[in-house]
């Protein structure tokens, strides 16, 4: 977010018209989200159980930003993980997103 702040200050100091500034502001946010999702996917596929658990904790913290389908696609397979710690973390995530989510996901 400090990069975004620097970008905004530069745009405003250069007196760029808003119709040019706003699209330029959105692109870095989209790129940040894409990088986060790539990192999340890499950590879920990691050989290290601690990385997989960290990725699940990240999903738990940011679950409201992910679609129900994304949560299900990423979390449910982790219930079959070979490590008990990963399975427990996946259960914790599903517990936090709640039964309403589970009922909606079942309908997808």
Image (cartoon, rainbow, N blue to C red):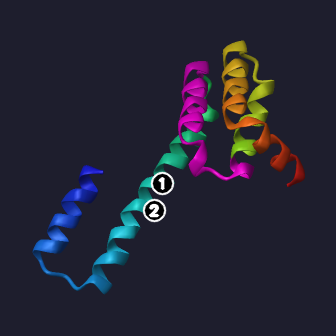
Residue at x 19%, y 82% (from the top left corner) = 16
- In this view, the residue farthest toward the front is 100
Q: Nearer the viewer, residue 66 or 46?
A: 66
Tell whether position 95 is magenta.
no
Q: Report the span colored magenta.
A: 48-70
Q: Quadrant of residue 48?
A: top right
Q: Position of residue 53 (x, y in %)?
A: 60, 24
User: Within 10 angstroms of label 2, few (less than 14), some, or many (20 or more) residues?
Assistant: few
The tag on residue 33 is 1
Residues under numbered marks 1 and 2 in contact, where contact means CB atoms less than 8 Å apart: yes
Q: What quarter of the picture does the C terminus occupy?
A: bottom right
Residue at x 67%, y 53% (from the top left corner) = 67
> 57 left or right of 79?
left
Question: For mark 2, what is the residue?
Answer: 30
Tell whether position 58 is magenta.
yes
Q: Position of residue 44 (x, y in %)?
A: 62, 34
Q: Quadrant of residue 98?
A: top right
> 105 left or right of 47?
right
Q: Nearer the viewer, residue 12 or 24?
A: 12
- In this view, the residue farthest toward the right is 107
Q: Position of residue 70 (x, y in %)?
A: 69, 49
Q: Nearer the viewer, residue 39 or 1?
A: 1
């Amino acid at each position: 977010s400090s990069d975004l702040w620097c970008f905004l200050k530069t745009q405003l100091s250069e007196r760029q018209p808003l119709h040019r500034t706003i699209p330029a502001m959105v692109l870095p946010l989209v790129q940040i989200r894409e990088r986060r999702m790539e990192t999340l996917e890499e950590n879920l596929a990691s050989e290290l159980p601690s990385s997989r658990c960290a990725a699940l904790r990240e999903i738990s913290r940011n679950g409201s930003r992910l679609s129900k389908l994304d949560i299900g696609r990423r979390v449910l397979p982790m219930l079959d993980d070979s490590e008990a710690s990963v399975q427990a973390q996946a259960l914790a995530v599903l517990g936090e997103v709640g039964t309403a989510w589970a009922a909606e996901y079942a309908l997808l």
